[in-house]
Amino acid sequence: MSNPCISSDKVEGTNVYNGNGDKLGSIDNLVIDKRSGQVRYAALEFGGFLGMGTDRYPIPWSMLKYDTNLDGYVVPLTESQLEKAPRYAEDERPEYGEDYGRKVYDYYGVAWL
Amino acid sequence: MSNPCISSDKVEGTNVYNGNGDKLGSIDNLVIDKRSGQVRYAALEFGGFLGMGTDRYPIPWSMLKYDTNLDGYVVPLTESQLEKAPRYAEDERPEYGEDYGRKVYDYYGVAWL
């Protein structure tokens, strides 16, 4: 049986692909609820077109499925979903409270924990 | 109110102190349950005496209390506790399964989640 756990430094930098196997970006960091120790989001680093900085897209942890063939996470996001998805600039750190969390989870149709 | 969440890359490298405010080491990485997204342990980097590599001490997440004055985590560990604590070498990666987890939690007297 594979290891049920993974190290944070193995997740950071891992590639993320859409359902067609096209690379979307990579995981920049994880956002963790201090009290419970629950990972709330993975921040997908995506964009950076035309010399602009990359944006960060918070993705609920439960949406990341590891694919051993791709050696990365598959997140079934369409381009139009990403266009309107919650995001913030590379140098921003939003207040990751419950309000923000519910907004992100609602956007992707994932039940709030 | 302070942000209820923290980024994994802010936790990694943060200093860890004992109850007297003596520095024990720093957080190397976090170990996360893949399925649930729950942080099981923080790996405390500690040791490295006389040119030897540092060891990693898995510590249940719930034992880390952030201290704003010290700008680090306080973990009330005594030297004798650390002497016998579960650990592994820098280049080792134990199989972080439930058996290992229960051993670590039992050692520190923390209830298994």
Image (tube, coloured by chain):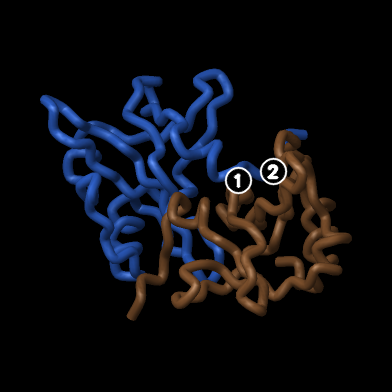
Chain colours: A brown, B blue
Camera-side residue of B56 and A11 = A11
Quarter occupied by residue A109: bottom right
Residue B5 position within the rendered picture, expressed as x and y whole percent measured from the top left: 66, 44
Task: Say above or below: B84 vs B102.
Answer: above
Give the amino acid type for the residue marked by disc 2 in the picture. Pro
Name the element at disc 1.
loop
The residue lying at 60 percent from left, 72 percent from top is A74
Q: Are marks 2 and 1 in contact (CB under 8 Å)?
A: yes
Q: Residue at x 33, y 64 (%)?
A: B96
Q: Can residue A60 be seen in this view?
A: yes
B77 with respect to A111 (left or right): left
Horizontal and vertical percent for residue A101? 77, 56
Q: Do labels 2 and 1 share a chain?
A: no
Is B60 in front, or is A106? A106
Q: Is mark 2 on a helix, strand or loop?
A: loop
For residue B4, the mark is 2
Identify the residue at image location x=51%, y=36%.
Answer: B65
Question: In the rendering, which numbered label is found on residue A34?
Answer: 1
Q: In this view, does B10 lie to the left or right of A50?
A: left
Q: Residues within 10 Å of mark 2 (few under 14, many from 20)?
A: some
Q: Nearer the viewer, residue A111 or A14?
A: A14
For the image shown, how many numbered marks are present on the structure? 2
User: On the picture, is A70 further left or further right than B20?
Assistant: right
Chain bearing mark 2: B
x%, y% of residue A25? 63, 57
| Residue sitting at x 79%, y 45% | A88
Where is A50 relative to B16, above or below?
below
